[in-house]
Image (tube, rainbow, N blue to C red):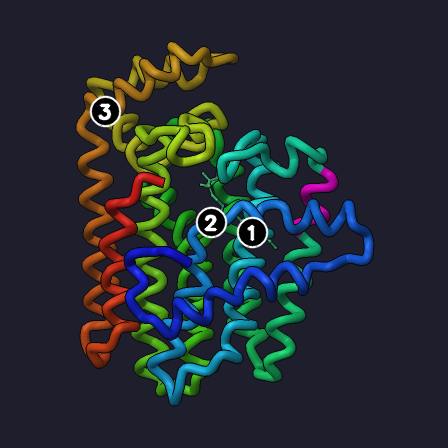
Amino acid sequence: MNEEWLVCKTTGAYLEGLDEIIVTRVQSGTPGVTSMVQMLIRKGGKRIRPALLLLSGSFGRSLSKDLLFPAAAMEMLHVASLYHDDVMDQATRRRQGPTVNNLYGNASAIHAGSFLFARAMELLADTGANLSQVVSHAVSNLCLGQLRESEYRYDVTASTDHYLAVIRQKTASLFELPCTLGAMLAEAGPDIVQAMAHFGKNLGMAFQLVDDLLDLTGDGTIMGKQPGADLREGVYTHAALLALQQPASREDLVGLLLLDVITDAELDRAIGIIKDSGALGETSMLAEHYVRDAIAAIEPLPQTPAKQSLLNLASYVTERRK
Ligand code: FPP
Ligand code: MG
């Protein structure tokens, strides 16, 4: 881990052992399957969700290295959701390389994701704690958010409230979960569990809003995935929906978005219309609002390196370029 926001040295040192746990726990007995399941893990990633579990755990009785196992489960659950997501989005690139579905086909990618998910659940079961209610709640929300997003594909009349409800489920639930679990497993009091859950939820909202802005304006070589994918796939995110609501931009934008096949030049024009509408700034301001809510939630917690890491992470989320 070499993330500048992570100033909590204990958490950083524990996270050094994360990949080994994951790589070991997804062994399948069949080398080809194992390498497919390990593929995205080996390509790196930000490791935000496992870090959140450990950092939250530091506000309980003591930060134990045992928390690294449920932390690994959070990353496996996240990667499992990406395997499934890339099938649904027909994505060809992620983390600077081809997606699993691109290399192995949709059916294999779906089963590899489900296998990762099952092994993540096994790691959580190994904790011996009764986590099934909180975990099943988060995972069902994750799936429902993704399904609701699909249901509204190519809907140029969708509301921004609907979009926010979708990202609350598909993304914020998987930021809230590690924060809740870390505090619960470390036996923190109910007020701390609640504060951490609130932090994670709001951080997740900001994270997805920025992710969606990067899809419109980001640099594909830095992000390691193709920008413009949302509009191409009919996923109209916050800024696009705002531009669609404005009479001055709506007609031209709808004309481009609902073309049977959209060329690169037409996609650029659609992004230009969204930019000219001022929607990007409005979406950024909303992301900042969620970051402020996240920061306010942990304000009562003691000033430790773990808290400083969470505060740094909150700033990083809106400044990041990948
Ligand atoms: C990325 O969204 C994907 C998610 C936030 C979660 C998707 C959840 C599922 C597919 C359900 C998975 C279920 C199980 C049981 C594992 P995005 O497409 O906006 O981001 P991207 O640009 O990184 O693709
Ligand atoms: Mg996607």
Identify the image quadrant of the N terminus. bottom left
Residue 140 in view here: no
Residue 113 in view here: yes
Q: What amino acid type should be assigned to the residue bearing mark 3? A: Lys
Residue 156, quarter of the rendered image: top left
Q: Are marks 3 and 1 in contact (CB under 8 Å)?
A: no
Of mark 1 and mark 2, the one earlier in the sequence is 2
Front of the two marks 1 and 2: 2
Q: Residues within 10 Å of mark 3 (few under 14, many from 20)?
A: some
The image shows residue 285 at horizontal and vertical percentages of 18, 44
Seen from the viewer's position, the closer of residues 272 and 160 is 272
Q: Is mark 2 within 8 Å of ligand 1?
A: no
Secondary element at image label 3:
helix
Q: Is residue 101 left or right of residue 179?
A: right
Residue at x-position 42% and y-position 47%? 166
Residue at x-position 32% and y-position 67%? 198
Residue at x-position 27% and y-position 18%? 272
Return the residue at label 2: 45
Return the residue at label 1: 79
The image shows residue 280 at horizontal and vertical percentages of 23, 33
Q: Residues within 10 Å of mark 2 (few under 14, many from 20)?
A: few
The image shows residue 201 at horizontal and vertical percentages of 35, 61
Q: Residues within 10 Å of mark 1 (few under 14, many from 20)?
A: many
Q: Which residues are magenta?
A: 107-113
Q: What amino acid type should be assigned to the residue bearing mark 1? A: Val
Residue furthest right in the image: 30
Residue 300, quarter of the rendered image: bottom left
How much space separates mark 3 and mark 2, taking CA atoms? 29 Å
Q: Is residue 252 above or below residue 135?
A: above
Seen from the viewer's position, the closer of residues 197 and 312 is 312
Return the residue at label 3: 275
